[in-house]
Image: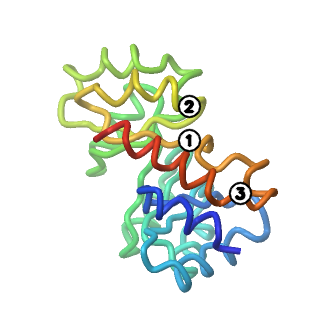
């Protein structure tokens, strides 16, 4: 199971988010945590406090949510596993800053205004940093990464379903190398 995660880490992308969109997600997190020590495995698409707790117990070293509720924030406060909550509006961003969050996921990035939107926020929300996801590709990642308030981007283009299903780990490693070179 952890072959393509090894390929990502080998290509220079050790931080790997496994989304909780299937019944196998927690098992996948456990497998990567146990079998791929070079990876920093996290859980994504956390929708409630129970999922947060389950993901933490499975071995997640970070947790990502597509939004933030008071219950998710409370679960994060009760856990040693850090949360990267998503925000899309300045109001959501300010509310999360009041909770102590300065590093946020910006999702869905492309649909919400993309790099121009984040650039416009860099001055009024100085000290807030983003990981844009949603519609990010190798091509448009280059418009986000130069921004002073963007630390990284996330995208599934580095491990496309067809390459995973074909077991083409070398191609996934090459895509990971291309992605890792963007911020270098």
Q: Which residue is mark 2?
A: 137
Cα separation between marks 2 and 3: 19 Å
**Front residue of 147 and 90:** 147
Cα–Cα span, label 1 and label 3? 18 Å
Whichever of labels 2 and 3 marks the residue nearer the N terminus, that label is 2
Q: Is residue 92 left or right of residue 107?
A: left
Give the residue number, with chain letter if any, for mark 1. Answer: 155
The quarter in which the N terminus is drawn is bottom right
User: Looking at the image, which is closer to me, 44 or 158?
Assistant: 158
Q: Reading the chain from its start, which is encountered first: label 1 or label 3?
A: 1
Quarter holding residue 94: top left
Find residue 150 and report its horizontal and vertical position in percent: 32, 34
Position of 174 relative to 3 (above/below): above
100 shown above or below 52: above
At mark 2, the secondary structure is: loop
| Horizontal side, residue 5 vs residue 64: left or right | right
The CA span between labels 2 and 1 is 6 Å
Q: Do the residues under discs 2 and 1 have CB atoms within 8 angstroms?
A: yes
Which x, y percent locates residue 123? 19, 20
- x 65%, y 60%: residue: 169
Q: Residues within 10 Å of mark 3 (few under 14, many from 20)?
A: some
Tell me the residue that label 3 is attached to: 168
């Amino acid at each position: 199971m952890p072959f393509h995660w090894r390929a990502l880490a080998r290509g220079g992308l050790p931080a790997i988010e496994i989304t909780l969109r299937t019944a196998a997600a927690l098992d996948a997190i456990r497998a990567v945590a146990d079998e791929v020590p070079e990876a920093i495995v996290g859980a994504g698409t956390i929708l409630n406090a129970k999922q947060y707790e389950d993901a933490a117990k499975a071995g997640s070293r970070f947790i990502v949510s597509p939004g933030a509720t008071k219950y998710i924030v409370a679960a994060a406060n009760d856990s040693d596993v850090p949360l990267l909550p998503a925000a899309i509006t300045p109001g959501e961003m300010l509310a999360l800053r009041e909770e102590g969050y300065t590093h946020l996921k910006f999702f869905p990035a492309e649909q919400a205004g993309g790099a121009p939107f984040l650039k416009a926020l860099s001055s009024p929300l100085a000290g807030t940093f983003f990981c844009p996801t949603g519609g990010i590709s190798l091509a448009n990642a280059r418009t986000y990464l130069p921004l002073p308030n963007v630390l990284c981007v996330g995208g599934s283009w580095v491990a496309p379903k067809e390459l995973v299903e074909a077991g083409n780990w070398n191609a996934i490693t090459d895509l990971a190398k291309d992605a890792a070179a963007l911020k270098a």
